[in-house]
Image (cartoon, grey):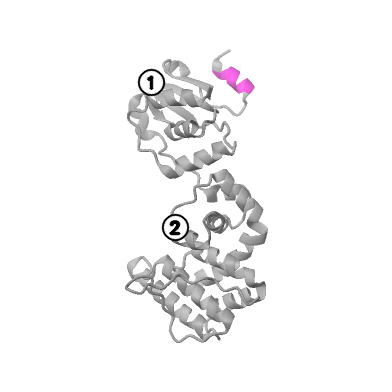
Amino acid sequence: MTNNSVLQMSFPYVYGENVEHEYPQVSVSVERITPETAKKMLATNVKNRKIKSVPLSTLEESMNGDEWSLNGESIIFDINGNLLDGQHRLTSCVKTGKTIDAVIVRGVQGDTQDTIDSGTRRHLADYIKMDGYKNYTDVSTIGKILMRKADMGITTSLFDNNATKRSIKAQRRFIHEQHDDRIEPLIQPIRLVTNRYKGVPIQLLGALFDEFRKSGDENFNEFVAQLAGKSAACMPVRLLQQKFVENAADMRSHGRGVFKHSVLAAYIIKTWNAYMRGDEMKRLTFTPGGKNPERFPEIFLGYE
């Protein structure tokens, strides 16, 4: 009986021809890697890419939270014992002091490194789709900004364009927990605005609308209805609509909006505050720089 026949008896979903005899130098094993072992493996890392902080932080969080599990991704060494793939996982193992289990492949040709990680990696939206959410792109985008807001606060989450350092597993758990109460209720209001005004970032509206909803559904829904409508009754909202139109026109002409995200956020907050207070506005401005820089506005949620 051939090795391939044995595999098919044990795992009936294996259909490829077993050609391991053509690669006698290649070995595959599942090994328990301690931080000390990881250090030794990293010592052979002579021709790998630069360590990237975001994936490293994500892996560290996963390992510190005991969320790391054997998932089939391999740590790869070439025929001369040089590390080709796995430096982020091994570095995280060392930094966290955690022992991990991993598939180890040894003996591949050194010139195959350029083909490693060349396939399409899954993003959060891919996992959210697999979890069964219908509006998976919106759900993942809104979920990420709400998680950043929870970690950093509203102002920092608006200004910091870096991706969250939380693991995919942690992000998925957050989305599962927050979907019904916080994420799903934002999808339709955000779509009403973004369908009418191109170039308004979904993540920006997600962070702000999540705050605005704290004033009550009646205030929030009326504000969105005016903002997404053709003619707003409230002057502050009409001024914001003009800013959105200006931003969309620049987006069409130059491929980017005329306003920075922080400025757009300030416009939206100022409009919301005026709407909530019943104030009239003749001009909608925000000057973050210059001799007398304007402070970023705080969100008004109503009088106590």
Q: Residue at x 54, y 83 (%)?
A: 232
| The disc label shown at residue 105, or none | none
Q: How far across and how far down the image is residue 98, in percent?
A: 54, 31
| Residue 14 visible from this viewpoint | yes
Q: Which percent across, then down, holds residue 175? A: 61, 53
| Residue toward you, 17 or 289 | 289
Q: Between residue 244 and residue 283, name the one nearer to us.
A: 283
Looking at the rendered image, the quarter that the N terminus falls into is: top right
* Crowding at mark 1 (Cα within 10 Å: few <14, some 14-19, many 20+): some
Identify which residue is drawn at 63% across, 64% down. 185
Which residue is more in the foreground, 127 or 68?
68
According to the picture, the residue beneath numbered tag 2 turns out to be 160
Q: Position of residue 6 (x, y in %)?
A: 60, 17
How far apart in space, not on screen, are marks 2 and 1 (Cα)? 40 Å
Residue 300 position by quadrant: bottom right
Q: Amino acid at mark 1?
A: Gly
Would residue 19 be seen by someone viewing this image from the given angle? no
- Label drawn at residue 81: 1
Q: Report the front residue among 243 and 245.
A: 243
Determine whether the residue tagged by mark 1 lies in a helix, strand or loop.
loop
Residue 34 located left or right of residue 260:
right
Boundaries of the magenta span: 4-10
Task: Give coordinates of residue 199: x percent, y percent.
Answer: 43, 68
Task: Indicate yes or no whether the magenta region holds residue 8.
Answer: yes
Q: Residue at x 46, y 52 (%)?
A: 163
The residue under the point 52% across, 62% down is 154
Q: Mark 2 against mark 1, which lies toward the viewer?
A: 2
- Give above or below for 159 relative to 249: above
Measured along the vertical axis of the image, is residue 222 above or below residue 61?
Answer: below
Neighbours of disc 2 within 10 Å: few (<14), some (14-19), many (20+): few
Helix, strand or loop for disc 2: loop
- Residue type at the position of mark 2: Asp
